[in-house]
Image: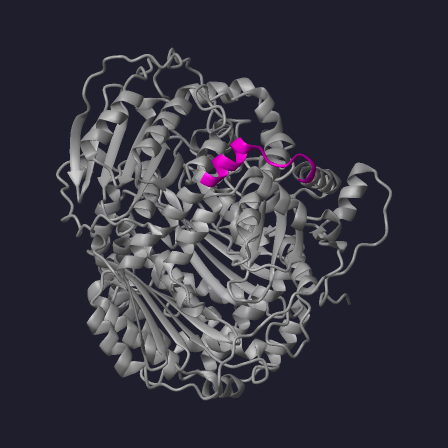
Amino acid sequence: MKHSIPISLTIAGLLLAMNSFAQTPSKTTSKTTTKPISGTSAKVSAPVKVTSVEGITEYVLSNGMKVLLFPDQSKQTITVNITYLVGSRNENYGETGMAHLLEHLVFKGSTKHPNVAQELTAHGCNPNGTTWLDRTNYFEVFQATDENLHWALDMESDRMVNSFIAKKDLESEMTVVRNEFEMGENYPSNILMQRTVSSAYLWHNYGNSTIGARADIEKVPIDRLKAFYRNYYQPDNAILLVAGKIDEAKTLKLINERFGIIPKPTRKLQTTYTDEPTQDGERLVSLQRTGDVQALCAVYHIPAGAHADFPACEVMTELLTDEPSGKLYKSLVETKKASYVYGYNFALREPGVAVYNAGIRLESSLDSAKNIFVKTLNDFAKYTPSQEEVDRIKNKMSKNAELTLNSPEDFGINLSEYIAQGDWRLFFYTRDQIQKVTPEDVHRVAQNYLKPSNRTLGEFIPTKNPDRAEIPVAPDIASLLKDYKGGEAIAQGEVFDPSPSNIESRTKRETVGGVKMAFLSKETRGDAVNAQLVLKFGDINSLQNKGIVGSQVVSMLMRGTEKHTRQQIQDELDKLKARVYVYGGADKCVVNIETLRNNLPAVLKLVSEFVQTPSFPIEEWEKLKQEKLAQIEEQKSDPQSIAYSELNRYINPFPKSDPRYNFTFDEQIVELNALTIDQIKQFHKDFYGASNANLAISGDFDEKEIKDLVTQSLANWKSPKPYSRLTRTYQDIAAINKSFETPDKANAMFFAQVKLPINDNDPDYPALLLGNEILGGGFLNSRLATRIRQKDGISYGVGSYAFADQSEDKIGGWGAYAIYAPENAGKLEVAFQEELQKVLTEGFTKQEIEEAKKGWLQNNQVSRAQDSYIAGKLEDNLTYNRTFKWDEDFENKVKALTPEQINAIMKKYIDPAKISIVKAGDFEKAKKKMGMPQEEKPAQAAGNKKP
């Protein structure tokens, strides 16, 4: 499932990333004669090659299944992604959410693979499944071994036709999906988008949210799910992609052996034939719910993703919403009428929509913002952008396409969107067509589609001569692409062994001035390279009362320098095909870089410029402040934000003057409003320098060129004040169990944590880490997930984590989290405590431990196959004076662990009586709903003042 609402809280991002599980299509009226595969070997015809574009080759099997092979020897990983051409577009009355619900059930097991979740973890995969309007896909990224590839193809072929789809699984998973539905209900801006899109469509199923209606989720009968599964989960409705370190011929043979024996079904798939009529007037939507930020949403009908007008529509939407050049951004954010704007197009098989959104703080006028919002959209239909404006957007989109191609994992998964539109080659075709878009093309599509009569306007807290937009039909894909050849395949990388010993043997380290450097140079696909620069500054004394200002300095660095404006910086990064992210706080600044070999020197020069000579424009500070205030105000009523903040404030009690102090929401607002641009400039002047800096690079680059550049640009940049790491001392914190009320929120949040006197060099830590992997890690097969999600159906997202400091400080801990419906609060805590007791009384089995070891070790290999991970790890090693020999030794310690050691360590550190628990949700409403007596009044979140 796709979510369009950004959530700032880290744990929320983790949970929503898991959201890609679920959603189901339409009622079937024809019966398939396909029988489950018994596993017998059958002689099948050889696959037939269809076409090849830029290193990707398409084949078709005798049963109609399409196969895409994308060899890339530069990484030790393989991505398997199977796309079924069915989504919520195919659902009938009473079946909304069926495609999504079925997606969940396919993870419940099949004849030959009864525990899919356990197998995914055991093979160290990064897996998931997602459902959207036109498709459902399942993918897994794993270490490139013959065993893993054989297993993955066998598992996917078996669950194509032999998944259980059992009533008992539906009964538990239905409540999990309902919990996911309730989680989405917590975000008014997300619901506003759903309501507005729904109102834009009168008849077409694109107006239905993929999650479905609550009643349909709760009442769907198992026989309809099974009929849907048998109808759509067949080889002639599937496209299998295998990308990464593969032998193409052997892989194709293996695919044919696994999938080719599945008979082609005799049933004929129904085609959807509903056409949305031309919209004959503006529609208005008003959403009234509790919340702390106002919102606007405008939806326009546009052509299908394969239509000739769609590339120009993509450029149009970027011209309206890009930061900081977009017309909506300039008219709303820069004038402080709104805190943020964003937009996107639905690229679909049939005509879709363009969506534009804006967030407005409560203290600002919604009517004033709405007037400007609407006027800007109307005026754009009369406006012809300049060539410079169009080129800027095309450079940005070209950069993103090229960088996506450099990652077979990301590209292989994202290709499902183009498959769903009608043909995988549309990725390349659309990329090429975007580069042909002219200012006149943008003006033409804006005139055609940005018409008031074609708009549905929504707000969160309503002609005589109608001018209607006729939406063209989707083109014939075969004729559109019959002569399309695409461009040349990009450069291939070397075969690279991601073992710690090999990485260490190829890493070079040296110091120039105050800059420590670690370089891992290797041939990569597309000449890609990742780098991380870290500046460390200040000490516990000099940073007193600097927590807020330090974090805002980091956010201002890329908003202008003495030589370049914010827009010029962004334009230059787009031209250099670079993604640069800056984050940090009072004691450090971190810059992550992703670019290409030939562009890295220029990118580093630009980074050096904005960290050393930022101009801190007052107008940019005012815009940033508004964005931050809006984010904080939205968190004030969000259960996840409140629970996380309250637990963090209690578990980590720092004095308010300490730079690590956790401010309440109201304290953050006061501090931000009081902060001046002069204070921001002074902090940079007082602390920033490269006397204590680390630079780590992994990928394709010229080591000497980079070293010379660092010598010239950073080595002599002295830090004004001395640096000393902020140390921490373990404190024994008494356990609490508190609830916080968040009225009118359908979903609740649970956090639990205990601090432990341990670091990652402690001999106990390997056992604690692996024990947690079994208890709450893995992919849906941990003890907690199996009980609370798989069996009880209480939570959509549940898990646990162990952590330990990398320094000599003995600071670590263990924690857990879960999202759930408020009425299940009691059941959740009971299940949580019971699973902890089972670990302490019964321990883990030898089989559990061996499977956890295997999965954890393979997942480490998958991580080390990513240059971004290696760059970050190299920087960590510079900070803590380590090499990858430490990683090798740590893995050996994990391999040597016995059940007795792990069980003893879990008993030593996991004491339920010492675990603090914090919950947030609408518990009072849940009690009234269940007819329960009200208990003592729940706590009020710190800083959430009531009038």
For residue 567, above or below residue 208: below
User: Could one spot residue 378 in this view of the protein?
Assistant: no
The residue positioned 39% from the left and 62% from the top of the image is: 872
List x then y, in percent, for residue 419.
Answer: 31, 37
List x then y, in percent, for residue 857.
Answer: 42, 44
For residue 518, above or below residue 745: below
The residue positioned 46% from the left and 80% from the top of the image is: 619
Q: How is the image coloured?
A: one colour
Q: Provide the residue span drawn in magenta.
A: 840-853
Badge count = 0
- Asked which quadrant contains residue 564, the reply is bottom left
Give the position of the C terminus as an image quadrant: bottom right
In the image, 710 versus 771, the foreground residue is 771
- Asked which quadrant contains residue 699, the reply is bottom left
Q: Is residue 847 magenta?
A: yes
In the image, 289 versus 800, the foreground residue is 800
User: Could one spot residue 781 in this view of the protein?
Assistant: yes
The residue positioned 78% from the left and 58% from the top of the image is: 939
Examine the residues drawn in magenta and state their main secondary structure. helix
Q: In this image, 753 relative to 51: left or right?
A: right
Q: In this image, 663 relative to 146: left or right?
A: right
The residue positioned 24% from the left and 31% from the top of the image is: 251
